[in-house]
Amino acid sequence: MLPTPRIRVPASSANMGPSFDAVGLALTVYLEVSVGVADATVETHPAVRAFRYAGGTGPISVTAGFPGGRGLGYSGAARVAGLLAAHVQSGEGLLESRGTVLAQAIALEGHPDNVAASLLGGVVASAGGHATRIPLALEPAVVVWIPPRETATSTSRHRLAVSVSFDDAVFNIGRTAVLVAALAAGDSGALRAATEDRLHQDARLARVPDSRAALRAAVAAGAWCAWLSGSGPSIAALADPADAQRIAAALPSSGRVIVLRIDDRGATIA
């Protein structure tokens, strides 16, 4: 059995407003998995479970530079890292295992947006088992506001409507199309309208008024756009890097603010 190096996987921010379960971006803050170390992480951790699912043996250790339960794709990053560690341990390379890891991660996570972004890096559109990076003509800062409480994705999903109107479906399809086009064309002026949503954000933000206030504050301070990150309660905003610190200072003091970039590499082996 080959020794397994350290696996490094970026956090992610999913949905980007209207693109529910379909678009996510990778962030420059990371979760790492090391194999065969003394300080083993508990077996119930999602990274360990994913490692075992893919046939990994021995102890693994997990460290992360971002918290779980905040809408930053912690479980998705953990599962990608655990799966990759098992595949590399068995002798597969990163590139040859990506397709299998993506399919396994989607099966474990239940939706593709977070895991695809964490695995591939950049901004990724995912559907039907396929994941494609969206070409970017922008190099934005990502301002992330993180409150101290957690949100369980499964609980948050149960609060969403089981059906949507024709008008709302068309609204979100159109916004998602404009979002992809605006990112590829470098049209920052279209991003605010392109990240509007009628499917999930209002229902989720109704329970976290400070998150709604942070979203509005980011846009009012000059962010190109802002959205509820994943199921929340964190907020993510895209902005001109020159404006990022000013926007960060305008966000509610009830949460912690970090200024990141879009990770362009995805999962790596160190």
Image (cartoon, helix red, strand yellow):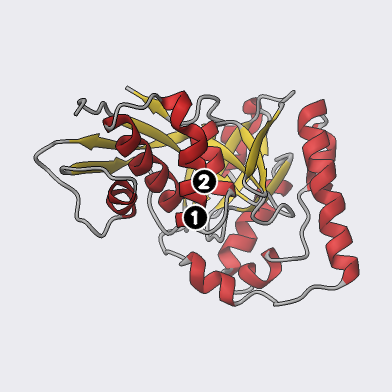
Q: Left or right: 245 with respect to 68?
A: right
Decide: few, some or many residues near mark 2? Use Cα within 10 Å; few <14, some 14-19, many ≥20: some
Residue 129, position as x, y percentages in the image: 62, 46
Q: Amino acid type of disc 1? A: Ala
Few, some or many C-alpha atoms within 10 Å of disc 1 (few <14, some 14-19, many ≥20)? few
Where 171 sits versus 138, above or below? below
Measured as percent of width and height from the top left, residue 169 is found at 84, 63
In this rendering, the answer to whether 165 lies above or below 189 is below
Position of the N terminus by quadrant: top left
**Residue type at numbered disc 2:** Ala
Contact check, label 2 and label 1, Cβ < 8 Å: yes
* Residue 38 seen from this side: yes
Residue 35 location in percent, x, y?
20, 36
At x 59%, y 39%, the residue is: 25
- Residue 15 appears at what percent x and percent y? 65, 52
To which residue does mark 2 refer? 103
Q: Can see residue 11? A: no
